[in-house]
Amino acid sequence: MIRVAVNGYNVIGRRVADAVTAQKDMELVGVAKTRPDYKAELALKKGYRVFAADEKGRKSFQAAGVACSGLSREMSSLADIVVDATPEEVGVANKEMYSDLGKSAIFQGGEEHDVAGLSFVAQCNYEKARGRKFVRVVSCNTTALCRVLNALDQAFEVERARVVIARRGADPDEYKKGPIDSVVLDPSTIPSHHGPDVNTVLPNFPVITMAMKIPTTHMHLHSLIVTVKDKGISDSRVLENLWRTPRLMFVDSGKQGFKSTANIVDYAREIGRPRSDIYESVIWEDSVKAIDNEIYLFMAVHQEAIVIPENIDAIRAMVGKEDKEQSMQMTDQSLGIRSSPK
Amino acid sequence: MIRVAVNGYNVIGRRVADAVTAQKDMELVGVAKTRPDYKAELALKKGYRVFAADEKGRKSFQAAGVACSGLSREMSSLADIVVDATPEEVGVANKEMYSDLGKSAIFQGGEEHDVAGLSFVAQCNYEKARGRKFVRVVSCNTTALCRVLNALDQAFEVERARVVIARRGADPDEYKKGPIDSVVLDPSTIPSHHGPDVNTVLPNFPVITMAMKIPTTHMHLHSLIVTVKDKGISDSRVLENLWRTPRLMFVDSGKQGFKSTANIVDYAREIGRPRSDIYESVIWEDSVKAIDNEIYLFMAVHQEAIVIPENIDAIRAMVGKEDKEQSMQMTDQSLGIRSSPK
């Protein structure tokens, strides 16, 4: 059994903790949190051991009468590997502690590539994480793009990809963030950081991204425009290639009635996904269009969930024995992700 | 004086009526409306003669005690030209009436190209409207795109333009329409209707559009990716060309602090534009980027206002004497649009 600790228990940490618990070859040592809020109470109800981020945090747990098993350092020392899901820039500050303890650690996409030296998307570079002490799982948009762009590149050789990303303004529980009723350029300059971030996984991949924030909370929406060197592409050839690609979900606007991101969230609730989570990059089949040697498509990304399978696979790649196919299959089965091909 | 009647008094009609009133060479005969609502009352307060769309409408005006000068047919007979700003598909149904009366008429972009046989954007094809009985002013997105794409084509020869359009879900007063908190593909298939609509003004122009609706009410946001044949482009060459193009407004995210569409609306209110109207295609200067022979930029479009100058110019092109430059200058001066170059 791989002993996993989860440091940080918010959007990603909570999901990783549940996903670790769902793996037959992993054991959750505990989760660490800064505050004894309702999220801590729910973790205790699930039977998770809850640790405080620091001494000050421990006192606030005591004051609130919420059980605390110690500090995150103690939790980390009990684990083979720590998934660091703390906020941006806190992860890099924790790195020294993991090093001191001789523990492996996985950081999230909010940290810079240099925190680990390897940025990870399972289907792109699983084997490169083998035996590494530190790995960074890239952010939601980068994960989604790497899955799809890598597949298109393998099949048709990408000459240039351009992606316009309409980002959800805030997660559903972030009640202070905007925008309301406006589009925020994110940033106004081109490219956005997403293209260069794809290059941390797929070096030198020719991709240019433009991003904006809009008043939604549930998913990002990507518009892809990809020129390929293969002059013989067609809608069906592109689709067949994507169908064979892991961790994509396909929806259709006509027959199935997926008119919007709202329908995808509704679907995830209806099939009983925990927290309505969608781990797949969601592609509208009826949007896939080949015009000359250019591929067009729409893709939706559930920002809170898409990196969860990657965190699980990164654990196995770093401290487990399974190869890429074995690990991805185990992860997918535990989370209810269909195995490809479609 | 050109006698102008405005049939339909909602988003476009109200603005055209005010713009006609602001022209030295035009006279507003009256406006026609279906219902005696607050918009009718405001028109009367401005001193406009208000006509009913039909007999049923006249009775509802009488019942409400709102002054009514007759039917839209009578209004049309008093005019040299009618600007038809009725809802989609009502315009085409009115065409027979205008023909019967021997009146010229301008239709809006909600109607098909065939309603008039000429789709109009002043700076692209003013002279083609000369002496025509019927002209169609294209919709907001098409107008904005034609201005910019035509300018880029003249300067650098466009090989292929791709545009991702994030459409405002509803106008500010459309309280029944959505979406709330989701992105609606509009449609999921590619291209959206906007590309073909550009081709009604610029035949065979190589443009492919993808569109979505988002939860905003104030502006559309276009992401442009334009490949040109000119291999010697640069950020500054592209900008200099755009600066020379009429009816564009330039904003900057850094120095000026235009971070979002909300800032543009706020700016329009602050400079005292009626109804906060923005008649220009608004381009973020700091977004303009040349990568190899590809141009990238963000553009915002005020859906309620951008076609107003085009309606005024179409009137002069059809029944006036001024040439393109004269008419555009008169229109721009009356509406407070800066004269190019920047």
Image (cartoon, coloured by chain):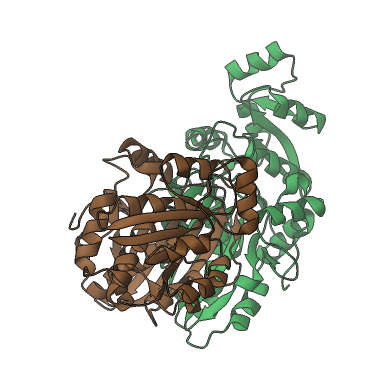
Chain colours: A brown, B green
| Image quadrant assignment for residue B297 | bottom right
Residue drawn where x is 52% and y is 37% of the image: B178
| Image quadrant assignment for residue A202 | bottom left
**Screen quadrant of the C terminus of chain A:** bottom left
In the rendering, at what x and y percent does residue B150 appear?
Answer: 53, 69
Badge count = 0
Residues B339 and A5: in front is: A5
Residue drawn where x is 77% and y is 30% of the image: B42
Left or right of A54 in this view: B14: right
Note whether residue B199 is visible.
no
Residues B341 and B95: in front is: B341
Q: In the displayed structure, would residue B15 be above or below residue B205?
A: above
Residues A183 and A201: in front is: A201
In the rendering, at what x and y percent does residue B217 appear?
Answer: 61, 44
Q: In the displayed structure, would residue A136 be above or below residue B267?
A: below
Residues B112 and A272: in front is: A272
Note whether residue B294 is visible.
yes
Q: In the displayed structure, would residue A247 be above or below residue B51?
A: below
Q: Which residue occupies the extreme bottom position in the image?
A: B232
Left or right of B21 in this view: B161: left
**Screen quadrant of the N terminus of chain A:** bottom left
Q: Which residue occupies the extreme top position in the image?
A: B63
Residue drawn where x is 75% and y is 71% of the image: B255
In the rendering, at what x and y percent does residue A160 appear?
Answer: 38, 76
In the rendering, at what x and y percent does residue B165 appear?
Answer: 50, 56
